[in-house]
Image: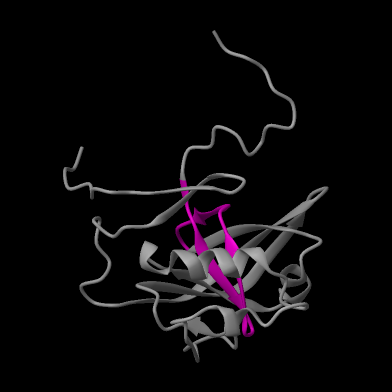
Protein backbone atom coordinates (compact mmCIF):
# COMPACT_ATOMS: atom_id res chain seq x y z
CA UNK A 1 0.00 0.00 0.00
CA UNK A 2 1.25 3.51 -0.80
CA UNK A 3 1.59 6.29 1.73
CA UNK A 4 1.21 9.96 0.87
CA UNK A 5 3.77 12.52 1.96
CA UNK A 6 3.80 16.29 1.66
CA UNK A 7 7.02 18.16 0.89
CA UNK A 8 8.71 14.87 0.11
CA UNK A 9 10.40 16.03 -3.08
CA UNK A 10 13.75 14.67 -1.90
CA UNK A 11 12.44 11.21 -1.01
CA UNK A 12 12.23 8.26 -3.31
CA UNK A 13 14.17 9.74 -6.16
CA UNK A 14 15.32 7.60 -8.95
CA UNK A 15 19.08 7.98 -8.55
CA UNK A 16 20.53 10.86 -10.57
CA UNK A 17 24.17 11.37 -11.45
CA UNK A 18 25.73 14.46 -9.91
CA UNK A 19 27.68 16.92 -12.04
CA UNK A 20 29.81 19.88 -11.10
CA UNK A 21 28.85 23.08 -12.89
CA UNK A 22 31.41 25.86 -13.10
CA UNK A 23 30.46 29.52 -13.59
CA UNK A 24 33.59 31.59 -14.05
CA UNK A 25 35.81 29.86 -11.48
CA UNK A 26 33.00 28.96 -9.06
CA UNK A 27 32.14 25.21 -8.93
CA UNK A 28 28.81 23.94 -7.60
CA UNK A 29 27.11 20.56 -7.60
CA UNK A 30 23.89 19.92 -9.54
CA UNK A 31 21.67 16.86 -9.32
CA UNK A 32 18.80 18.21 -11.38
CA UNK A 33 20.06 18.27 -14.97
CA UNK A 34 19.04 16.81 -18.32
CA UNK A 35 19.25 17.27 -22.09
CA UNK A 36 16.17 19.06 -23.43
CA UNK A 37 16.75 19.40 -27.18
CA UNK A 38 18.82 17.72 -29.89
CA UNK A 39 19.28 20.38 -32.57
CA UNK A 40 20.52 22.71 -31.26
CA UNK A 41 21.80 20.61 -28.37
CA UNK A 42 20.34 22.20 -25.24
CA UNK A 43 21.09 21.00 -21.72
CA UNK A 44 19.31 22.23 -18.59
CA UNK A 45 20.24 22.58 -14.95
CA UNK A 46 17.99 23.52 -12.07
CA UNK A 47 19.42 25.78 -9.38
CA UNK A 48 18.12 27.38 -6.21
CA UNK A 49 17.62 31.10 -6.89
CA UNK A 50 19.05 32.06 -3.48
CA UNK A 51 22.42 30.46 -4.24
CA UNK A 52 25.48 32.58 -4.90
CA UNK A 53 26.13 30.48 -8.00
CA UNK A 54 22.79 31.53 -9.48
CA UNK A 55 23.71 35.20 -9.11
CA UNK A 56 26.89 34.51 -11.10
CA UNK A 57 25.13 32.55 -13.84
CA UNK A 58 24.60 35.16 -16.53
CA UNK A 59 26.33 34.27 -19.80
CA UNK A 60 27.95 30.83 -19.75
CA UNK A 61 28.89 27.78 -17.70
CA UNK A 62 30.44 24.34 -18.01
CA UNK A 63 28.96 21.01 -16.95
CA UNK A 64 31.66 18.66 -15.70
CA UNK A 65 31.12 14.91 -15.42
CA UNK A 66 33.38 13.28 -12.80
CA UNK A 67 33.72 9.72 -11.59
CA UNK A 68 33.17 8.65 -7.98
CA UNK A 69 36.91 8.92 -7.44
CA UNK A 70 36.10 12.62 -6.87
CA UNK A 71 33.16 12.02 -4.50
CA UNK A 72 34.58 14.22 -1.74
CA UNK A 73 35.23 17.09 -4.16
CA UNK A 74 31.73 16.78 -5.63
CA UNK A 75 30.26 17.10 -2.13
CA UNK A 76 32.48 20.07 -1.26
CA UNK A 77 31.36 21.90 -4.41
CA UNK A 78 27.75 21.46 -3.28
CA UNK A 79 28.19 22.04 0.45
CA UNK A 80 29.72 25.51 0.57
CA UNK A 81 28.80 28.92 -0.80
CA UNK A 82 31.44 30.45 -3.06
CA UNK A 83 30.94 33.92 -1.61
CA UNK A 84 31.81 32.60 1.87
CA UNK A 85 34.44 29.91 1.27
CA UNK A 86 37.19 29.34 -1.31
CA UNK A 87 35.85 25.96 -2.42
CA UNK A 88 38.79 25.32 -4.74
CA UNK A 89 41.22 25.37 -1.81
CA UNK A 90 39.17 22.57 -0.22
CA UNK A 91 38.76 20.54 -3.40
CA UNK A 92 41.99 18.53 -3.46
CA UNK A 93 43.01 17.02 -6.80
CA UNK A 94 40.70 19.32 -8.79
CA UNK A 95 42.24 21.71 -11.30
CA UNK A 96 40.44 24.36 -13.33
CA UNK A 97 41.53 24.92 -16.92
CA UNK A 98 40.48 27.31 -19.66
CA UNK A 99 37.54 26.22 -21.77
CA UNK A 100 37.57 26.34 -25.57
CA UNK A 101 34.33 28.21 -26.31
CA UNK A 102 33.23 29.91 -23.07
CA UNK A 103 34.81 32.10 -20.40
CA UNK A 104 33.89 29.75 -17.53
CA UNK A 105 36.54 27.23 -16.55
CA UNK A 106 36.40 23.45 -17.00
CA UNK A 107 37.59 20.79 -14.57
CA UNK A 108 40.66 18.96 -15.87
CA UNK A 109 39.74 15.73 -14.06
CA UNK A 110 36.35 15.42 -15.81
CA UNK A 111 35.88 12.57 -18.24
CA UNK A 112 33.43 14.77 -20.19
CA UNK A 113 32.59 18.49 -20.24
CA UNK A 114 29.78 20.46 -21.89
CA UNK A 115 30.60 24.10 -22.55
CA UNK A 116 27.35 26.08 -22.57
CA UNK A 117 26.12 29.58 -23.20
CA UNK A 118 22.94 30.60 -21.41
CA UNK A 119 20.07 30.11 -23.86
CA UNK A 120 17.10 30.72 -21.55
CA UNK A 121 16.19 31.01 -17.88
CA UNK A 122 12.80 30.02 -16.55
CA UNK A 123 12.19 31.13 -12.97
CA UNK A 124 9.92 29.31 -10.58
CA UNK A 125 9.13 30.05 -6.92
CA UNK A 126 12.42 28.79 -5.46
CA UNK A 127 14.43 27.40 -8.36
CA UNK A 128 15.28 28.42 -11.88
CA UNK A 129 15.70 26.19 -14.89
CA UNK A 130 18.77 27.38 -16.79
CA UNK A 131 18.97 26.04 -20.31
CA UNK A 132 22.37 26.12 -21.94
CA UNK A 133 23.18 25.83 -25.60
CA UNK A 134 26.05 23.37 -25.77
CA UNK A 135 28.83 24.97 -27.82
CA UNK A 136 31.43 22.25 -27.25
CA UNK A 137 31.51 18.70 -25.94
CA UNK A 138 34.92 17.64 -24.70
CA UNK A 139 35.76 14.12 -23.59
CA UNK A 140 38.81 12.08 -22.71
CA UNK A 141 39.29 9.30 -25.22
CA UNK A 142 38.78 5.92 -23.62
CA UNK A 143 37.26 7.45 -20.47
CA UNK A 144 33.59 7.74 -21.52
CA UNK A 145 32.47 4.23 -20.68
CA UNK A 146 29.32 2.60 -19.34
CA UNK A 147 31.41 1.08 -16.55
CA UNK A 148 32.42 4.47 -15.09
CA UNK A 149 31.60 4.52 -11.40
CA UNK A 150 29.49 7.64 -10.88
CA UNK A 151 28.04 9.45 -7.86
CA UNK A 152 24.25 9.42 -7.73
CA UNK A 153 21.99 11.49 -5.51
CA UNK A 154 19.09 9.69 -3.85
CA UNK A 155 17.78 12.93 -2.35
CA UNK A 156 18.95 15.27 0.37
CA UNK A 157 22.33 13.98 1.66
CA UNK A 158 21.87 10.38 0.44
CA UNK A 159 24.26 9.09 -2.21
CA UNK A 160 25.03 5.87 -4.00
CA UNK A 161 27.35 4.61 -6.72
CA UNK A 162 26.72 2.42 -9.69
CA UNK A 163 28.79 -0.72 -9.21
CA UNK A 164 28.40 -2.47 -12.54
CA UNK A 165 28.30 -1.11 -16.04
CA UNK A 166 25.53 -1.81 -18.49
CA UNK A 167 26.71 -3.52 -21.62
CA UNK A 168 23.61 -5.00 -23.23
CA UNK A 169 21.58 -3.03 -25.72
CA UNK A 170 17.84 -3.48 -25.42
Q: Which residue corresponds to the image point at 51% horizontal and 66% vertical from the top-left?
A: 74
Give the residue furthest to the bottom: 98
Q: Position of residue 18 (x, y in %)?
A: 49, 58
Q: Is residue 58 left or right of residue 113?
A: right
Q: Is residue 132 visible?
A: no
5 inside magenta stretch: no
User: Which residue occupies the foreground of this view, 82 or 61?
Assistant: 82
Q: Which residue corresponds to the image point at 80% horizontal and 50% vertical from the top-left?
A: 126
Q: Is residue 169 visible?
A: yes
Q: Is residue 90 left or right of residue 170?
A: right
Task: Specify the quadrant that holds the N terminus.
Answer: top right
Vertical comparison of 71 with 59: above or below: above
Q: Is residue 27 left or right of residue 93?
A: right
Give the residue furthest to the left: 168
Which quadrant holds residue 25?
A: bottom right
Vertical comparison of 95 with 72: above or below: below
Q: Which residue corresponds to the image point at 42% horizontal and 69% vertical from the top-left?
A: 70
Q: Position of residue 78 (x, y in %)?
A: 62, 64
Q: Position of residue 89 (x, y in %)?
A: 59, 85
User: Which residue occupies the foreground of this view, 170 or 148?
Assistant: 148
Q: How is the image coloured?
A: one colour
Tally of marks: 0
Task: Please give the range of residues in magenta.
Answer: 16-39
Q: Position of residue 52 (x, y in %)?
A: 77, 71
User: Which residue occupies the foreground of this view, 111 or 12?
Assistant: 12
Amino acid sequence: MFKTIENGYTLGYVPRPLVVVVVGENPFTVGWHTPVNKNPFLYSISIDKTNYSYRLLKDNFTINFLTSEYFEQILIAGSYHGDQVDKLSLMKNIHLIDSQKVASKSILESFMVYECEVYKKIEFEDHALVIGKVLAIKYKQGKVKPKNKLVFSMGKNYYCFNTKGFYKKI
